[in-house]
Image (cartoon, rainbow, N blue to C red):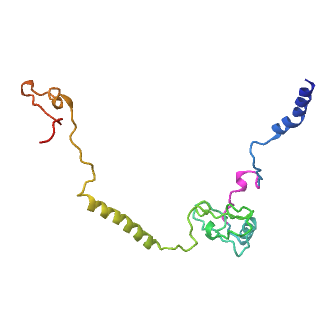
């Protein structure tokens, strides 16, 4: 009994506080900003000082910093980055976040959700042109359609006898006249002559 009390007091002192202090998430979240407004792009830069401050904010050199036109879409001072798809980035580079091939603090492209490794690839040359791929597809589908049309005169159903019912094919049940009831034989057990 004494051993149970010691074990219970030990678990109260060590395990329970750990369970109470444990976060619900198994990953650590490091906040780079305090609120959503910290991540929002600033206003469109109009002066050279504002352009320089925005370039410094995004970690770019002033000569590399370019912005989207102020057409009301709300990009503000966010940099206009070149389109580099995930497949085009070097897989052997020592990335901070290798799953997305990104480094810490690297600004994302505005359409980063479209140009990931598992999405469209704008930057690599395809093996076949779009015209060749479309012709190949249409040729394949056209061949299947031609085979279907050529096979239409030849039905592929199994031949079968009409359904057989007892009592002379249910003649009376179908509303037939009992005076004129025919005798229908579907088969006989007599040997063929």
User: Which residue is nearer to you in this view: 2 or 163?
Assistant: 163
Residue 93 location, x and y as percent? Answer: 72, 69
| Residue found at the very far left of the displayed protein | 179
> In the rendered image, is residue 90 in sight?
yes
> Could you tell whether 32 is left or right of 11 in the image?
left
Residue at 80% from the left image edge and 41% from the top image edge: 22
> Could you tell whether 93 is left or right of 13 in the image?
left
| Residue found at the very far bottom of the displayed protein | 63
> Could you tell whether 73 is left or right of 157 in the image?
right
On whether residue 41 falls in the magenta region, the answer is yes
User: Which residue is nearer to you in this view: 140 or 117?
Assistant: 140
Magenta highlight: main SS? loop
Residue 187 location, x and y as percent? Answer: 18, 36
> Could you tell whether 57 is left or right of 117 in the image?
right
On whether residue 89 falls in the magenta region, the answer is no
Position of the N terminus by quadrant: top right
Residue 16, by quadrant, is top right
Residue at 20% from the left image edge and 40% from the top image edge: 162
> In the rendered image, is residue 85 in sight?
no
Position of the C terminus by quadrant: top left
Total labels drawn: 0
Q: Is residue 165 above or below residue 1?
A: below
Q: Is residue 189 above or below residue 133?
A: above
Residue 129 location, x and y as percent? Answer: 47, 74
User: Which residue is nearer to you in this view: 46 or 178?
Assistant: 178
Residue 86 location, x and y as percent? Answer: 63, 66
The residue range painted magenta reads 32-44
């Amino acid at each position: 009994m004494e051993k149970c009390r010691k074990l219970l007091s030990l678990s109260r002192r060590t395990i329970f506080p750990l369970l109470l202090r444990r976060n619900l998430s198994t990953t650590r979240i490091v906040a780079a900003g305090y609120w959503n407004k910290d991540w929002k792009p600033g206003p469109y830069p109009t002066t050279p000082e504002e352009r320089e401050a925005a370039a410094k904010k995004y970690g770019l050199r002033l000569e590399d910093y370019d912005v989207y036109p102020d057409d009301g879409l709300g990009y503000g001072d966010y940099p206009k980055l070149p389109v580099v798809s995930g497949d085009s980035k070097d897989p052997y580079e020592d990335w901070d976040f290798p799953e997305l091939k990104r480094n810490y603090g690297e600004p994302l492209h505005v359409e980063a959700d479209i140009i990931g490794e598992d999405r469209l690839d704008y930057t690599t040359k395809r093996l076949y042109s779009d015209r060749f791929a479309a012709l190949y597809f249409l040729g394949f589908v056209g061949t299947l359609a031609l085979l279907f049309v050529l096979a239409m005169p030849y039905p592929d159903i199994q031949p079968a006898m009409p359904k057989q019912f007892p009592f002379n094919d249910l003649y009376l049940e179908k509303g037939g006249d009992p005076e004129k009831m025919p005798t229908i034989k579907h088969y006989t057990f007599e040997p063929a002559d």
